[in-house]
Image: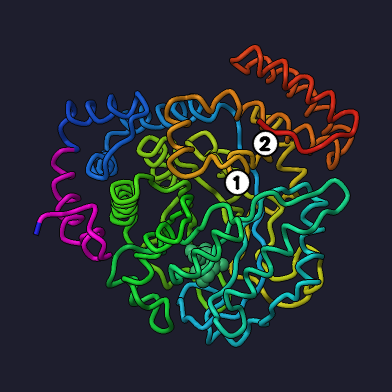
Amino acid sequence: MAYNPKALEATAFIDHEYITETIKKAKEIAENKEKVQAILEKARDCQGLSFKDVAVLLEVEDESVWQIIFKLAKEIKEKIYGQRIVMFAPLYLSNYCVNECVYCGYCHSNQEMHRIKLTQEEIVQEVKALQDMGHKRLALEVGEDYENAPIEYILESIKSIYGVKHKNGAIRRVNVNIAATTVENYKKLTEAEIGTYILFQETYHKETYEKVHPKGPKHNYNYHTEAMDRAMQGGIDDVGIGVLYGLYDYKYDTVAMLMHAEHLEATYGVGPHTISVPRLKKAGGMELNQFEHLVDDKDFLKIVSILRVAVPYTGIIISTRESQDLRAELLKHGVSQISGGSCTGVGGYSKTQEEKNTSQFQVTDERTLGEIVSFLCENDYIPSFCTACYREGRTGERFMRLAKTGQIGNICQANALITLKEYGSDYASQSLQQTIERLIDKEIEKIPSEKVKQMTESIVTEITSGKRDFRF
Ligand code: SAM
Protein backbone atom coordinates (compact mmCIF):
# COMPACT_ATOMS: atom_id res chain seq x y z
CA MET A 1 0.00 0.00 0.00
CA ALA A 2 1.29 3.47 -0.86
CA TYR A 3 2.43 5.75 1.93
CA ASN A 4 -0.35 8.13 2.99
CA PRO A 5 0.57 11.03 5.30
CA LYS A 6 -3.12 11.51 6.13
CA ALA A 7 -3.57 7.96 7.38
CA LEU A 8 -4.78 7.89 10.96
CA GLU A 9 -3.10 4.73 12.20
CA ALA A 10 0.40 5.19 13.62
CA THR A 11 1.99 2.33 11.72
CA ALA A 12 0.59 3.82 8.49
CA PHE A 13 1.70 7.45 8.93
CA ILE A 14 5.00 6.28 10.41
CA ASP A 15 5.50 3.64 7.76
CA HIS A 16 8.51 1.51 8.74
CA GLU A 17 9.06 -0.05 5.31
CA TYR A 18 8.82 3.34 3.64
CA ILE A 19 11.36 4.84 6.07
CA THR A 20 13.91 2.07 5.51
CA GLU A 21 13.38 2.28 1.75
CA THR A 22 13.75 6.08 1.84
CA ILE A 23 17.02 5.79 3.78
CA LYS A 24 18.33 3.14 1.38
CA LYS A 25 17.61 5.34 -1.65
CA ALA A 26 19.00 8.38 0.17
CA LYS A 27 22.43 6.74 0.40
CA GLU A 28 22.64 6.71 -3.41
CA ILE A 29 21.22 10.21 -3.90
CA ALA A 30 23.67 11.63 -1.33
CA GLU A 31 26.53 10.74 -3.66
CA ASN A 32 25.09 12.93 -6.40
CA LYS A 33 26.44 16.44 -5.79
CA GLU A 34 23.87 18.16 -8.00
CA LYS A 35 20.94 16.55 -6.23
CA VAL A 36 22.34 17.50 -2.83
CA GLN A 37 22.91 21.02 -4.12
CA ALA A 38 19.28 21.21 -5.30
CA ILE A 39 18.04 20.22 -1.82
CA LEU A 40 20.18 22.93 -0.24
CA GLU A 41 18.84 25.51 -2.68
CA LYS A 42 15.30 24.53 -1.77
CA ALA A 43 16.11 24.99 1.92
CA ARG A 44 17.74 28.36 1.36
CA ASP A 45 14.48 30.23 0.77
CA CYS A 46 12.96 28.89 4.03
CA GLN A 47 10.45 26.62 2.29
CA GLY A 48 11.47 23.66 4.45
CA LEU A 49 12.40 20.15 3.36
CA SER A 50 10.57 16.85 3.09
CA PHE A 51 11.62 13.83 5.14
CA LYS A 52 13.02 12.35 1.93
CA ASP A 53 15.31 15.38 1.47
CA VAL A 54 16.35 15.10 5.10
CA ALA A 55 17.18 11.42 4.66
CA VAL A 56 19.55 12.43 1.84
CA LEU A 57 21.29 15.17 3.84
CA LEU A 58 21.79 12.80 6.77
CA GLU A 59 23.77 10.51 4.44
CA VAL A 60 26.14 13.23 3.22
CA GLU A 61 29.74 12.43 4.07
CA ASP A 62 31.53 15.32 2.39
CA GLU A 63 32.74 17.65 5.18
CA SER A 64 32.58 20.70 2.90
CA VAL A 65 28.85 20.11 2.32
CA TRP A 66 28.35 19.91 6.08
CA GLN A 67 29.99 23.30 6.47
CA ILE A 68 27.43 24.65 3.98
CA ILE A 69 24.55 23.05 5.92
CA PHE A 70 25.81 24.54 9.23
CA LYS A 71 26.07 27.98 7.63
CA LEU A 72 22.63 27.65 6.11
CA ALA A 73 21.10 26.63 9.46
CA LYS A 74 22.62 29.72 11.07
CA GLU A 75 21.40 31.99 8.27
CA ILE A 76 17.86 30.60 8.34
CA LYS A 77 17.74 30.89 12.10
CA GLU A 78 18.88 34.51 12.04
CA LYS A 79 16.46 35.36 9.26
CA ILE A 80 13.44 34.00 11.13
CA TYR A 81 14.33 34.36 14.82
CA GLY A 82 16.87 37.17 14.73
CA GLN A 83 19.00 36.88 17.89
CA ARG A 84 16.05 35.97 20.13
CA ILE A 85 16.20 32.93 22.41
CA VAL A 86 13.05 31.95 24.30
CA MET A 87 13.63 31.00 27.95
CA PHE A 88 11.71 28.46 30.05
CA ALA A 89 12.03 26.08 32.99
CA PRO A 90 10.61 22.63 33.67
CA LEU A 91 8.46 22.12 36.75
CA TYR A 92 8.22 18.55 38.02
CA LEU A 93 5.04 17.89 39.99
CA SER A 94 5.11 14.17 40.63
CA ASN A 95 7.52 11.33 39.95
CA TYR A 96 5.09 8.48 40.57
CA CYS A 97 5.07 6.38 37.45
CA VAL A 98 3.43 3.13 36.41
CA ASN A 99 5.65 2.65 33.36
CA GLU A 100 8.88 0.70 33.08
CA CYS A 101 10.83 2.90 30.63
CA VAL A 102 14.26 1.30 30.86
CA TYR A 103 16.07 4.64 30.40
CA CYS A 104 14.21 6.73 32.96
CA GLY A 105 14.82 7.35 36.66
CA TYR A 106 11.04 7.40 37.21
CA CYS A 107 10.80 3.76 36.06
CA HIS A 108 8.23 2.03 38.29
CA SER A 109 10.62 -0.66 39.56
CA ASN A 110 13.40 1.82 40.45
CA GLN A 111 13.35 1.28 44.20
CA GLU A 112 15.96 3.98 44.83
CA MET A 113 13.66 6.73 43.63
CA HIS A 114 12.05 8.67 46.44
CA ARG A 115 8.44 9.02 45.18
CA ILE A 116 6.71 12.27 45.78
CA LYS A 117 3.83 14.35 44.52
CA LEU A 118 3.61 18.04 45.35
CA THR A 119 0.57 19.43 47.15
CA GLN A 120 -1.04 22.58 45.74
CA GLU A 121 0.63 24.59 48.51
CA GLU A 122 4.02 23.12 47.57
CA ILE A 123 3.35 23.94 43.92
CA VAL A 124 2.71 27.56 44.90
CA GLN A 125 6.10 27.58 46.69
CA GLU A 126 7.81 26.15 43.61
CA VAL A 127 6.16 28.74 41.36
CA LYS A 128 7.18 31.58 43.67
CA ALA A 129 10.77 30.33 43.56
CA LEU A 130 10.60 30.17 39.74
CA GLN A 131 9.06 33.64 39.56
CA ASP A 132 11.84 34.95 41.80
CA MET A 133 14.32 33.65 39.24
CA GLY A 134 12.44 35.60 36.53
CA HIS A 135 10.69 32.79 34.68
CA LYS A 136 7.42 33.44 32.86
CA ARG A 137 7.08 30.19 30.90
CA LEU A 138 7.06 26.70 32.38
CA ALA A 139 6.96 23.15 31.10
CA LEU A 140 4.97 21.07 33.51
CA GLU A 141 6.33 17.51 33.88
CA VAL A 142 4.51 14.62 35.50
CA GLY A 143 5.14 10.86 35.52
CA GLU A 144 2.27 8.68 34.31
CA ASP A 145 0.10 7.48 37.19
CA TYR A 146 -3.67 7.81 37.04
CA GLU A 147 -4.09 7.19 40.78
CA ASN A 148 -1.42 9.49 42.15
CA ALA A 149 -1.49 12.12 39.41
CA PRO A 150 -4.84 11.95 37.59
CA ILE A 151 -5.96 14.60 35.10
CA GLU A 152 -7.89 16.39 37.87
CA TYR A 153 -4.62 16.87 39.79
CA ILE A 154 -2.93 18.23 36.68
CA LEU A 155 -5.80 20.64 35.95
CA GLU A 156 -5.85 21.86 39.54
CA SER A 157 -2.07 22.35 39.43
CA ILE A 158 -2.29 24.40 36.21
CA LYS A 159 -4.86 26.62 37.90
CA SER A 160 -2.59 27.02 40.93
CA ILE A 161 0.37 27.92 38.74
CA TYR A 162 -1.51 30.58 36.75
CA GLY A 163 -2.95 31.90 40.02
CA VAL A 164 0.36 32.77 41.70
CA LYS A 165 1.03 36.51 41.56
CA HIS A 166 4.15 37.03 43.62
CA LYS A 167 5.81 40.48 43.62
CA ASN A 168 6.03 41.38 39.90
CA GLY A 169 6.08 37.73 38.90
CA ALA A 170 3.59 35.74 36.85
CA ILE A 171 3.67 32.51 34.90
CA ARG A 172 2.10 33.47 31.61
CA ARG A 173 2.38 30.22 29.69
CA VAL A 174 2.23 26.67 31.03
CA ASN A 175 3.32 24.06 28.53
CA VAL A 176 2.36 20.55 29.52
CA ASN A 177 4.37 17.35 29.15
CA ILE A 178 2.15 14.53 30.36
CA ALA A 179 1.64 11.02 29.09
CA ALA A 180 -0.52 10.26 26.06
CA THR A 181 -4.16 10.56 27.02
CA THR A 182 -7.73 10.69 25.68
CA VAL A 183 -9.39 13.32 23.44
CA GLU A 184 -11.61 14.14 26.41
CA ASN A 185 -8.60 14.91 28.61
CA TYR A 186 -6.96 16.95 25.87
CA LYS A 187 -10.17 19.00 25.70
CA LYS A 188 -9.81 19.65 29.42
CA LEU A 189 -6.22 20.79 28.92
CA THR A 190 -7.41 23.13 26.14
CA GLU A 191 -9.97 24.61 28.53
CA ALA A 192 -7.24 25.01 31.16
CA GLU A 193 -5.46 27.28 28.65
CA ILE A 194 -2.23 25.38 28.35
CA GLY A 195 0.42 26.58 25.92
CA THR A 196 2.03 23.72 24.01
CA TYR A 197 1.20 20.08 24.65
CA ILE A 198 4.54 18.29 24.57
CA LEU A 199 5.07 14.57 24.24
CA PHE A 200 8.26 12.94 23.07
CA GLN A 201 7.96 9.88 20.91
CA GLU A 202 11.23 8.60 22.47
CA THR A 203 11.77 6.42 19.38
CA TYR A 204 9.64 5.93 16.27
CA HIS A 205 11.15 2.49 15.68
CA LYS A 206 8.32 0.23 16.89
CA GLU A 207 10.40 -2.78 17.82
CA THR A 208 12.82 -0.70 19.89
CA TYR A 209 9.95 1.34 21.32
CA GLU A 210 8.30 -1.82 22.65
CA LYS A 211 11.62 -3.10 24.02
CA VAL A 212 12.45 0.07 25.97
CA HIS A 213 8.86 0.39 27.25
CA PRO A 214 8.32 -3.23 28.30
CA LYS A 215 5.29 -2.66 30.56
CA GLY A 216 2.62 -0.14 31.47
CA PRO A 217 0.34 1.98 29.27
CA LYS A 218 3.32 3.54 27.50
CA HIS A 219 4.11 0.13 25.99
CA ASN A 220 1.33 0.71 23.44
CA TYR A 221 3.17 2.17 20.42
CA ASN A 222 0.07 3.13 18.44
CA TYR A 223 -1.66 4.81 21.36
CA HIS A 224 1.49 6.86 22.12
CA THR A 225 2.24 7.73 18.50
CA GLU A 226 -1.34 8.83 17.80
CA ALA A 227 -1.39 11.11 20.88
CA MET A 228 -0.85 14.30 18.87
CA ASP A 229 -3.81 13.42 16.64
CA ARG A 230 -6.01 13.12 19.72
CA ALA A 231 -4.52 16.34 21.15
CA MET A 232 -5.44 18.18 17.96
CA GLN A 233 -8.90 16.63 17.96
CA GLY A 234 -9.16 17.91 21.55
CA GLY A 235 -8.52 21.47 20.38
CA ILE A 236 -4.80 21.79 21.16
CA ASP A 237 -3.21 23.37 18.13
CA ASP A 238 0.33 23.88 19.46
CA VAL A 239 1.99 20.52 19.92
CA GLY A 240 5.64 19.72 20.62
CA ILE A 241 7.24 16.48 19.46
CA GLY A 242 10.69 14.99 20.07
CA VAL A 243 12.98 12.01 19.89
CA LEU A 244 15.03 10.77 22.82
CA TYR A 245 18.30 10.46 20.93
CA GLY A 246 20.30 7.42 21.95
CA LEU A 247 17.51 4.86 21.95
CA TYR A 248 17.71 3.98 18.27
CA ASP A 249 19.53 4.94 15.06
CA TYR A 250 19.39 8.75 14.83
CA LYS A 251 18.91 8.78 11.06
CA TYR A 252 15.83 6.57 11.26
CA ASP A 253 14.35 8.58 14.11
CA THR A 254 15.00 11.97 12.51
CA VAL A 255 13.41 10.91 9.22
CA ALA A 256 10.45 9.39 11.09
CA MET A 257 9.99 12.50 13.24
CA LEU A 258 9.74 14.63 10.10
CA MET A 259 7.29 12.11 8.69
CA HIS A 260 5.25 12.69 11.86
CA ALA A 261 5.46 16.46 11.28
CA GLU A 262 4.26 15.96 7.68
CA HIS A 263 1.39 13.82 8.91
CA LEU A 264 0.22 16.54 11.32
CA GLU A 265 0.52 19.23 8.68
CA ALA A 266 -1.30 17.14 6.05
CA THR A 267 -4.06 16.05 8.40
CA TYR A 268 -4.67 19.10 10.61
CA GLY A 269 -3.16 21.91 8.55
CA VAL A 270 -0.44 22.66 11.09
CA GLY A 271 2.83 20.93 11.91
CA PRO A 272 4.50 20.79 15.32
CA HIS A 273 5.03 24.09 17.13
CA THR A 274 8.26 22.81 18.66
CA ILE A 275 10.70 19.95 18.31
CA SER A 276 12.78 18.84 21.30
CA VAL A 277 16.01 16.96 20.91
CA PRO A 278 16.79 15.38 24.29
CA ARG A 279 19.80 13.07 24.38
CA LEU A 280 19.98 10.15 26.75
CA LYS A 281 21.68 10.98 30.07
CA LYS A 282 22.62 8.91 33.07
CA ALA A 283 19.61 8.27 35.29
CA GLY A 284 18.91 6.26 38.43
CA GLY A 285 18.60 2.55 37.68
CA MET A 286 20.35 2.67 34.28
CA GLU A 287 23.85 3.02 32.85
CA LEU A 288 24.53 4.72 29.52
CA ASN A 289 26.67 1.82 28.31
CA GLN A 290 23.48 -0.29 28.09
CA PHE A 291 22.57 1.72 24.98
CA GLU A 292 24.26 1.09 21.64
CA HIS A 293 22.88 4.06 19.67
CA LEU A 294 24.23 6.98 21.74
CA VAL A 295 24.70 10.09 19.59
CA ASP A 296 28.03 11.94 19.80
CA ASP A 297 28.34 15.74 19.75
CA LYS A 298 29.36 15.86 16.10
CA ASP A 299 26.29 13.98 14.89
CA PHE A 300 24.12 15.91 17.31
CA LEU A 301 25.14 19.22 15.70
CA LYS A 302 24.27 17.72 12.34
CA ILE A 303 20.82 16.65 13.53
CA VAL A 304 19.99 20.09 14.94
CA SER A 305 21.23 21.88 11.81
CA ILE A 306 19.21 19.64 9.53
CA LEU A 307 16.08 20.14 11.61
CA ARG A 308 16.53 23.89 11.43
CA VAL A 309 16.69 23.90 7.65
CA ALA A 310 13.90 21.29 7.33
CA VAL A 311 11.32 23.00 9.57
CA PRO A 312 12.37 26.67 9.70
CA TYR A 313 9.28 27.87 11.57
CA THR A 314 9.28 25.20 14.26
CA GLY A 315 10.96 26.11 17.55
CA ILE A 316 13.88 23.83 18.46
CA ILE A 317 14.33 23.23 22.18
CA ILE A 318 17.49 22.28 24.04
CA SER A 319 17.39 21.52 27.74
CA THR A 320 20.03 21.58 30.46
CA ARG A 321 20.75 17.93 29.65
CA GLU A 322 23.48 19.45 27.45
CA SER A 323 26.61 21.25 28.64
CA GLN A 324 27.17 25.00 28.58
CA ASP A 325 29.68 24.74 25.73
CA LEU A 326 27.60 22.48 23.56
CA ARG A 327 24.50 24.61 24.14
CA ALA A 328 26.46 27.65 22.97
CA GLU A 329 27.39 25.76 19.82
CA LEU A 330 23.82 24.51 19.28
CA LEU A 331 22.47 28.06 19.46
CA LYS A 332 24.50 28.80 16.35
CA HIS A 333 23.04 25.73 14.63
CA GLY A 334 19.39 26.57 14.99
CA VAL A 335 18.18 26.16 18.57
CA SER A 336 15.58 28.80 19.45
CA GLN A 337 14.44 27.86 22.97
CA ILE A 338 16.46 26.85 26.02
CA SER A 339 15.73 26.08 29.64
CA GLY A 340 17.68 27.72 32.42
CA GLY A 341 18.28 27.21 36.13
CA SER A 342 16.44 23.89 35.78
CA CYS A 343 15.85 21.26 38.38
CA THR A 344 14.63 17.81 37.29
CA GLY A 345 13.73 16.79 40.85
CA VAL A 346 10.29 17.23 42.41
CA GLY A 347 10.20 20.22 44.78
CA GLY A 348 13.73 21.24 43.84
CA TYR A 349 13.20 24.97 43.30
CA SER A 350 11.84 25.79 46.73
CA LYS A 351 14.22 23.17 48.17
CA THR A 352 11.49 21.36 50.06
CA GLN A 353 12.84 17.96 48.93
CA GLU A 354 16.47 18.92 48.51
CA GLU A 355 18.04 15.94 50.28
CA LYS A 356 16.08 13.21 48.55
CA ASN A 357 16.66 11.44 45.24
CA THR A 358 13.72 12.59 43.08
CA SER A 359 15.38 13.43 39.74
CA GLN A 360 14.43 11.97 36.40
CA PHE A 361 17.94 12.27 34.94
CA GLN A 362 21.13 14.29 35.48
CA VAL A 363 21.39 17.86 34.23
CA THR A 364 24.72 19.07 32.84
CA ASP A 365 24.32 22.84 32.49
CA GLU A 366 23.99 23.89 36.13
CA ARG A 367 24.21 27.67 35.67
CA THR A 368 21.60 29.89 37.27
CA LEU A 369 19.08 31.63 35.02
CA GLY A 370 20.93 34.91 35.69
CA GLU A 371 24.21 33.39 34.52
CA ILE A 372 22.59 32.09 31.34
CA VAL A 373 20.87 35.42 30.61
CA SER A 374 24.19 37.16 31.14
CA PHE A 375 25.98 34.72 28.83
CA LEU A 376 23.34 35.22 26.13
CA CYS A 377 23.48 39.03 26.32
CA GLU A 378 27.28 39.04 26.19
CA ASN A 379 27.11 36.92 23.05
CA ASP A 380 24.63 39.25 21.36
CA TYR A 381 21.58 37.05 21.84
CA ILE A 382 18.32 38.44 23.18
CA PRO A 383 16.92 36.26 25.97
CA SER A 384 13.16 36.45 25.52
CA PHE A 385 10.53 35.86 28.21
CA CYS A 386 7.78 36.55 25.70
CA THR A 387 4.49 34.62 25.82
CA ALA A 388 2.49 37.10 23.73
CA CYS A 389 1.50 34.92 20.74
CA TYR A 390 -0.27 32.39 22.86
CA ARG A 391 -1.98 35.07 24.96
CA GLU A 392 -3.12 36.89 21.83
CA GLY A 393 -4.49 33.68 20.30
CA ARG A 394 -1.71 33.52 17.72
CA THR A 395 -1.43 29.73 17.90
CA GLY A 396 -1.58 26.78 15.54
CA GLU A 397 -2.19 27.61 11.91
CA ARG A 398 -2.63 31.33 12.62
CA PHE A 399 0.84 31.50 14.18
CA MET A 400 2.39 29.59 11.28
CA ARG A 401 0.73 31.86 8.72
CA LEU A 402 2.05 35.00 10.44
CA ALA A 403 5.48 33.44 10.85
CA LYS A 404 5.73 32.27 7.27
CA THR A 405 4.78 35.65 5.83
CA GLY A 406 7.37 37.32 8.04
CA GLN A 407 4.70 39.51 9.65
CA ILE A 408 5.61 38.27 13.07
CA GLY A 409 9.18 39.61 12.94
CA ASN A 410 8.25 43.13 14.02
CA ILE A 411 6.36 42.12 17.09
CA CYS A 412 8.68 39.31 18.16
CA GLN A 413 11.66 41.61 18.41
CA ALA A 414 9.58 44.18 20.33
CA ASN A 415 8.05 41.61 22.68
CA ALA A 416 11.43 40.04 23.39
CA LEU A 417 12.91 43.42 24.33
CA ILE A 418 9.93 44.38 26.49
CA THR A 419 10.06 41.15 28.46
CA LEU A 420 13.84 41.34 28.76
CA LYS A 421 13.44 44.86 30.13
CA GLU A 422 11.03 43.47 32.76
CA TYR A 423 13.51 40.73 33.63
CA GLY A 424 16.34 43.27 33.96
CA SER A 425 14.29 45.58 36.16
CA ASP A 426 12.96 42.86 38.48
CA TYR A 427 15.53 40.08 38.69
CA ALA A 428 18.95 41.04 37.33
CA SER A 429 22.02 42.08 39.31
CA GLN A 430 23.09 45.69 38.80
CA SER A 431 25.80 44.84 36.32
CA LEU A 432 23.52 42.49 34.34
CA GLN A 433 20.86 45.18 34.31
CA GLN A 434 23.35 47.57 32.71
CA THR A 435 24.28 44.96 30.10
CA ILE A 436 20.58 44.44 29.36
CA GLU A 437 19.95 48.18 28.99
CA ARG A 438 22.79 48.48 26.47
CA LEU A 439 21.48 45.50 24.53
CA ILE A 440 17.95 46.92 24.44
CA ASP A 441 19.20 50.31 23.19
CA LYS A 442 21.05 48.57 20.39
CA GLU A 443 18.36 46.04 19.44
CA ILE A 444 15.41 48.43 19.50
CA GLU A 445 16.94 50.03 16.41
CA LYS A 446 16.50 46.77 14.53
CA ILE A 447 12.68 46.78 14.80
CA PRO A 448 11.68 47.18 11.15
CA SER A 449 8.49 49.22 11.63
CA GLU A 450 9.04 52.81 12.78
CA LYS A 451 5.67 52.81 14.54
CA VAL A 452 6.39 49.60 16.51
CA LYS A 453 9.85 50.95 17.35
CA GLN A 454 8.41 54.13 18.85
CA MET A 455 5.78 52.22 20.79
CA THR A 456 8.46 49.89 22.16
CA GLU A 457 10.55 52.84 23.29
CA SER A 458 7.64 54.30 25.21
CA ILE A 459 6.80 50.89 26.78
CA VAL A 460 10.41 50.53 27.91
CA THR A 461 10.09 53.92 29.62
CA GLU A 462 6.85 52.83 31.29
CA ILE A 463 8.53 49.67 32.59
CA THR A 464 11.29 51.83 34.10
CA SER A 465 8.58 53.74 35.91
CA GLY A 466 7.16 50.51 37.39
CA LYS A 467 4.42 49.36 34.99
CA ARG A 468 4.41 45.71 33.81
CA ASP A 469 2.94 43.21 31.38
CA PHE A 470 2.89 44.90 27.98
CA ARG A 471 2.70 43.03 24.73
CA PHE A 472 2.15 43.41 21.01
N1 SAM B 1 4.62 11.82 31.32
C1 SAM B 1 5.81 12.08 30.65
C2 SAM B 1 6.52 10.76 30.43
O1 SAM B 1 6.47 9.94 31.32
O2 SAM B 1 7.09 10.55 29.35
C3 SAM B 1 6.61 12.98 31.48
C4 SAM B 1 7.65 13.66 30.78
S1 SAM B 1 9.19 13.08 31.10
C5 SAM B 1 9.27 13.86 32.62
C6 SAM B 1 10.10 13.99 29.92
C7 SAM B 1 11.04 13.26 29.02
O3 SAM B 1 12.30 13.07 29.63
C8 SAM B 1 10.68 11.88 28.55
O4 SAM B 1 9.71 11.92 27.55
C9 SAM B 1 12.01 11.37 28.05
O5 SAM B 1 12.20 11.67 26.67
C10 SAM B 1 13.02 12.19 28.82
N2 SAM B 1 13.91 11.32 29.61
C11 SAM B 1 13.58 10.29 30.38
N3 SAM B 1 14.68 9.68 30.86
C12 SAM B 1 15.74 10.35 30.35
C13 SAM B 1 17.16 10.19 30.45
N4 SAM B 1 17.71 9.21 31.15
N5 SAM B 1 17.95 11.07 29.79
C14 SAM B 1 17.42 12.06 29.08
N6 SAM B 1 16.09 12.26 28.94
C15 SAM B 1 15.25 11.40 29.56
- Secondary structure beneath dot 1 equals strand
Residue 17 on image: x %, y %: 16, 60
- Asked if disc 1 is less than 8 Å from ligand 1, the answer is no
In front of the other: 295 or 434:
434
Question: In the current view of this chain or complex, which residue is farthest to the top?
Answer: 450
Q: Who's the residue at 17% across and 26% down the image?
A: 34
Count of numbered badges drawn on the protein:
2
Tell me which secondary structure the magenta stretch mostly adopts.
Answer: helix
Residue 3 on image: x %, y %: 15, 54
Q: Who's the residue at 70% across and 63% down the image?
A: 159
> What is the distance, in whole Å, between disc 1 and disc 2 at their CAs?
9 Å
* Neighbourhood count class around disc 1 (C-alpha, 10 Å): few under 14, some 14–19, many 20 upward: some
Which residue is label 2 attached to? 383
Q: Who's the residue at 75% across and 66% down the image?
A: 348
Residue 99 on image: x %, y %: 48, 81
Which residue is label 1 attached to? 338
Give above or below for 409 relative to 27. Answer: above
Q: Is residue 264 left or right of residue 345?
A: left
In front of the other: 349 or 69:
349
Q: Who's the residue at 27% across and 72% down the image?
A: 207
Q: Is residue 470 left or right of residue 108?
A: right
Q: Callout 1, which amino acid?
A: Ile
Q: Quadrant of the N terminus?
A: bottom left
Residue 43 on image: x %, y %: 32, 29
| Residue 77 part of the magenta-drawn span | no
Q: Callout 2, which amino acid?
A: Pro
Q: Earlier in the sequence, mark 1 or mark 2?
A: 1
Is residue 202 visible in the rendered image? The answer is yes
* Neighbourhood count class around disc 2 (C-alpha, 10 Å): few under 14, some 14–19, many 20 upward: many
Q: Which residues are magenta?
A: 2-29
